[in-house]
Image (cartoon, helix red, strand yellow):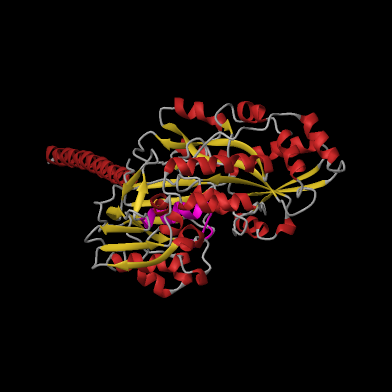
């Protein structure tokens, strides 16, 4: 009897041990399965930390880069620019130009749908461009094509014809510019301005799942994308203005991509086993715009003095560690229309002499405003502040939230100077000239007016010969340099931080990131 109890107890213990071992194995297998599922999910999700948030998602009525970055993920253009700045077909598969350059006929991709199920066709293209080029709508991107477009006609579902009142030299480049030329669903346009501003519907690889100012922007894959299944299931944009916070997020894996890596962190991130930095020269120039409508900056010699006061060698080589180069024109050397207009030498005595001749008193107050989201530009603005203080000005440098900054620029009585980046989003000097220097442009925040430059902008726009256009712009660049409506600073290079496993982010010279092929 005693042996029987002992035997039973022993069997019970063996069974218990077996069950514990099996449970542990099962737990390990379950844990391994959960871990793999989590890794697979992480491989399909991309988190991007940017410096600023969008002002609006209406692609026909915005000019800020943050907004363009968002709606470019969901809405596409007829043609696009690759990472070398070359034109490629997108929603238009081919095109022809008439001999006089005034008629452009596009053959469209077939079988494409907007993410609301509305078919993409010639009628949709017509509706979009009639909206943005209707002057009565008062949309920000009207000036790009509005003055040159007579009408749009369609032939069937997949042929659309643009009838221009004159040739437009950079016509295809303009169509490749996402701001003003993204095609959104006609159904959204019917719903009105608020629907377009908050949730534009496009044909792109991703669609907006969530967007509201002050919070994360979340995109989800478009399973019916005409270009094939997107490699990611979700992309999340986070607004993180602080440089150190973005870098830390990248290093800890909280973010997969970050904008504007500070130069001081580039080497460390490149030497890490988990991160890397992609440095790209883009066609953006940084400048301080000068309000030409207020004294004493209404005098060319005063504006020239400000330019002589800036030590661009110290700015580019010391402050930015040689990772940028001084500006020699209003556009960068990456621009198709670039020509060297020269750069102001550093000459403080010359600057003081010009100010004396203009009767500018020491201690004159100057207010420089800057956009809060343009984080990497702020130290250049502070450098200009210090330089002008050494010249005798009493300078305030004020950083404003983007919306407040843009509202301030609408009122010339509220600023003297403004820090801003000029980027040729068409990869052609046309849009920088038209936006920033045409006397009646809404975005001519320097309040600059020169009939010769207006004429050059008009002639350059309609000149079909590339070399002739370059000559027109070459003379314009030189005259603008002499008029000095800007303090010309440097040509920009961007530094994009990413985890080592992130591949195939396309960044054209226009700096609008293309996520179509991004994968982990």
For this orientation, the residue located farthest to the front is: 100
Image position of 42 (left or right of 475): left
Q: Which residues are magenta?
A: 55-77
Q: Is residue 31 above or below residue 60?
A: above
> Which one is nearer the viewer's eye here, 370 or 86?
86
- Is residue 59 located in the magenta-colored stretch of the structure? yes
Place residue 165 in its image quadrant.
bottom left
Q: Position of residue 189 (x, y in %)?
A: 41, 71
Quadrant the C terminus occupies: top left
Identify which residue is drawn at 48% across, 71% down.
193
Q: Position of residue 101 (x, y in %)?
A: 37, 54
Residue at 47% across / 48% down in the picture? 425
Q: Quadrant of residue 480?
A: top right
Q: Is residue 74 above or below residue 370?
A: below
Q: Verify whether residue 368 appears in magenta.
A: no
Horizontal relation, residue 314 to residue 138: left or right? right
């Amino acid at each position: 009897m005693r042996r029987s109890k002992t035997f039973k107890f022993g069997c019970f213990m063996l069974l218990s041990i077996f069950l514990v071992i099996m449970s542990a194995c099962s737990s390990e297998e379950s844990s391994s399965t959960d871990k793999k599922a989590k890794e697979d999910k992480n491989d399909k999700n991309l988190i991007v930390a940017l410096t600023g948030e969008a002002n609006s998602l209406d692609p026909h009525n915005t000019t800020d880069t943050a907004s363009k970055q968002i709606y470019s993920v969901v809405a596409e253009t007829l043609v696009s620019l690759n990472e070398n700045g070359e034109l490629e077909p997108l929603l238009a598969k081919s095109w022809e130009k008439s001999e006089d350059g005034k008629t452009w006929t596009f053959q469209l991709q077939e079988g494409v749908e907007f993410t609301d199920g509305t078919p993409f066709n010639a009628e949709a293209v017509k509706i979009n461009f009639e909206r943005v080029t209707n002057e009565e709508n008062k949309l920000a991107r009207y000036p790009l094509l509005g003055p040159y477009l007579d009408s749009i006609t369609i032939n069937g579902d997949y042929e659309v014809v643009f009838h221009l009142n004159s040739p437009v030299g950079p016509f295809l480049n303009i169509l490749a510019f996402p701001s003003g030329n993204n095609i959104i669903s006609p159904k959204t346009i019917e719903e009105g301005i608020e629907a377009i501003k908050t949730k534009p519907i496009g044909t792109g690889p991703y669609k907006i799942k969530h967007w509201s100012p002050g919070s994360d922007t979340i995109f989800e894959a478009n399973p019916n994308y005409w270009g094939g299944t997107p490699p990611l299931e979700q992309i999340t944009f986070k607004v993180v203005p602080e440089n150190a916070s973005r870098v830390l997020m990248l290093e800890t894996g909280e973010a997969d991509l970050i904008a504007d890596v500070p130069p001081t962190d580039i080497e460390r991130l490149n030497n890490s086993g988990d991160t890397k930095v992609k440095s790209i020269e883009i066609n953006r120039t940084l400048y301080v715009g000068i309000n030409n409508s207020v004294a004493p900056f209404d005098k060319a010699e005063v504006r020239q003095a400000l330019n002589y006061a800036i030590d661009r060698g110290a700015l580019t080589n010391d402050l930015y560690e040689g990772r940028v180069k001084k500006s020699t024109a209003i556009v960068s050397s990456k621009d198709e229309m670039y020509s060297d207009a020269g750069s102001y030498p550093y000459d403080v005595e010359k600057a003081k002499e010009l100010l004396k001749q203009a009767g500018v008193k020491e201690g004159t107050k100057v207010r420089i405003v800057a956009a809060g989201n343009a984080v990497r530009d702020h130290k250049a603005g502070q450098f200009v502040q210090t330089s002008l203080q050494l010249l005798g000005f009493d300078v305030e440098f004020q950083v404003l939230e983007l919306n407040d900054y843009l509202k301030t620029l609408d009122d010339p009585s509220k600023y003297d100077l403004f820090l801003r980046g000029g980027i040729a989003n068409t990869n052609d000097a046309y849009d920088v000239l038209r936006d920033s220097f045409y006397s009646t442009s809404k975005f001519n925040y320097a309040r600059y007016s020169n009939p010769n430059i207006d004429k050059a902008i008009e002639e350059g726009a309609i000149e079909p010969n590339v070399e002739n256009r370059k000559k027109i712009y070459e003379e314009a660049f030189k005259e603008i340099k002499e008029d000095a409506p800007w303090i010309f600073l440097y040509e920009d290079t961007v530094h994009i931080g990413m985890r080592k496993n992130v591949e195939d982010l396309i960044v054209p010279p226009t700096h609008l990131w293309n996520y179509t092929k991004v994968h982990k």
